[in-house]
Amino acid sequence: MNRLLVTFTFCTGLALLSNCGSSGKDSASGKGGAGGGGTTGLSAAGGGTTSGIGGSTGGTTLGTTGGAGGASAPSGGAGGATDLGGTAAGGAAGTTGGAVGSGGVSSSDAAAGATDTGGIIGTGARADGAIGTGGTTKTGGTIGTGGIAGATGAGGAPGGPLIHNDVFWKDTSGNPIYSQGGGVLKAGNTYYWYGVKYGGAVTYAASPTKLNDDTSFVAVTIYSSTDLVTWKFENNALTAASLTAAGADPSNWIGRVGAAYNATTKKYVLNGQYGGSPDTAQFFATSDTPGGVFTWQRTQPTITNVTNNNCGDQSIFNDDDGTAYLVCSSLSGRSNLYVAPLRPSDYLNVEPATKVFGGAGREGNAMFKYNGRYYLCSSDLHGWNASHSYYISATNILGPYGTEGVIGTTDADFSHVTQTGLFLTVQGSAQATVIFGGDRWSDFAGNGIGFNQWMPLTFNGAAPIMQSLSVWSVEATTGAWSVGPGNNYVLNPSFEADRVTITQPAGWTTTNGTNATGGYSGRWAWQVSGSLDQQIADLPSGTYTLSAWVKSSGTGGQLYAKGFGGTDKSLAIASGTSWTDVSINGIAVSNGTCDVGITSTGATVTVDDFVLSQN
């Protein structure tokens, strides 16, 4: 059994990802919560690489679409299903339509029997990127523009279960995961993920074509996992009915939940925000087990030393000595950040807070610890929309904290179109890997597909850098991670990072262009009558395919790939008013870079969903 030491932070509070939780009162979109979680495609990839030492066998996948690894038809295929936390030996190919296992996301684009490539490396592959017989490595730890391969991004890490971002995750029963504005707590060898299920999340996951404002509280959900990829639904910790029975009003805002274990009372304590009267309060509930039903205990209307008496956004941080803290911003404005211990005797009260930051408004407040240093992270006040991610750090949890910085690469796609949500640190035998758990409030912002986006951090000295990946894996025992097969190296590929109409999209350079609603997927696409370009660096050598969905008002547009060490490639875009998938194959990258984009003369090309992936 893999053994991990994981330090968790929960972003609890009024709104998360698209800003790890813009709370309703201060966000432009009004009183807000967030909707459902993602989907873990719980299927072993059929026909996966059978690896020797260190290689995964078939590779369980998380939330894939289009049939590649873990895709399933609505009825669910029988082949390749895994047990919780396990990886099927090789996996069985799915049935017609690419269905495999139970719980994968269905896709009309899945070819019959489509499977994931399974193992990431072959026999004898090492975490330093060298490969043995039959193995091919992805140089994990390097990404697109601005990516830096840190010590924690060892290339060619053993292939574990795959995390697929940009999809709706599903649990082991094939149902959507609804977990927004929450966090993860480890109990024994099992991880328990607590979050909120909102009415609008259910609506959006069923038909992700239009955002909504349904922040009605359904439940605080609990999911469990032994590998941080395959999640089993355990229980509803709290429901509207249980709140009513306890004398609370479930029509009020409920959000930003986190959990801790109190060794004195031997109780698991759930904390979060309760939008009661006259204003936001803290709520506390307890359970004898981490996956059980929780009993509502009390509310706390005032936290000593906090401006405006209580929190804007918040999360629970569990230190490695077992002490639990509330990390939060001030209510109404969020221009101050605080750290406050929970009452040691029972964790049912927030003790007087220490102010650690003052300045611009910050939300989505969450914390992690790495190499003995505490990092308090947050987002801009963008309502439900995404933002780059800020951090301050200190060697003492109560400060003093240093100058605020921006987590590396999060400017290029606004934190993979998320808001800071939760962090967890996997302490492996070879290295520690910090996972950035971003909240994408797509149900309320309409900014793409999926609610939960998890990515590894690397470090340049003490400065964190987010590796914005669509497919990757982390090896639980060693802590090493690697880029997964099919990863999209384009940043902000669907133009969902930018929350308003703009002429320069995050991560791209362009002339004569603007974003426009009505994308092929999600809310936005890009319209160009000049040029659109992204320079991608730190690419592993190999052969790639570039694709995009386009439509054009006339002829004169071209999709291109250049600067990759070989002869430039381009493809003419035909005139047409319907979305068309176009692609360029055989891009042999030999110098670690590639420029991708579109030029157009005499026509307006609308483009969405760029993909640059290694074959």
Image: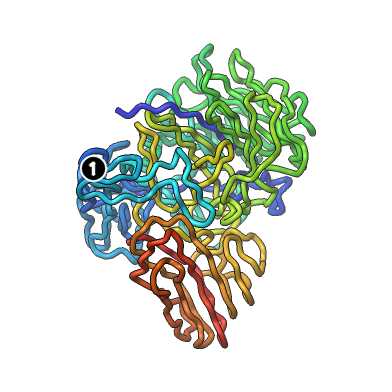
Residue holding disc 1: 88
**Exactly how many numbered labels are in the figure?**
1
Q: Position of residue 276 (x, y in %)?
A: 70, 35
Looking at this rendering, what residue extends furthest in the right direction? 308
In this figure, which colouring scheme has been used for the structure? Answer: rainbow
431 is higher (above) or lower (below) than 453: above
- Which residue is depicted at the point 56% across and 56% down? 413
**Quadrant assignment, res 14:** top right
Q: Pinpoint residue 553: horizontal percent, then vertical percent.
A: 54, 85
Report the amino acid beneath label 1.
Answer: Ala
Is residue 136 among the parts visible in the rendering?
yes
Residues 199 and 222: in front is 222
The quarter of the rendered structure image containing the C terminus is bottom left
Residue 452 in view of the camera: no
Residue placed most toward the observer, 516 or 238: 516
SS at circle 1 = loop
Q: Quadrant of residue 517?
A: bottom right
Above/below status of 179 relative to 571: above
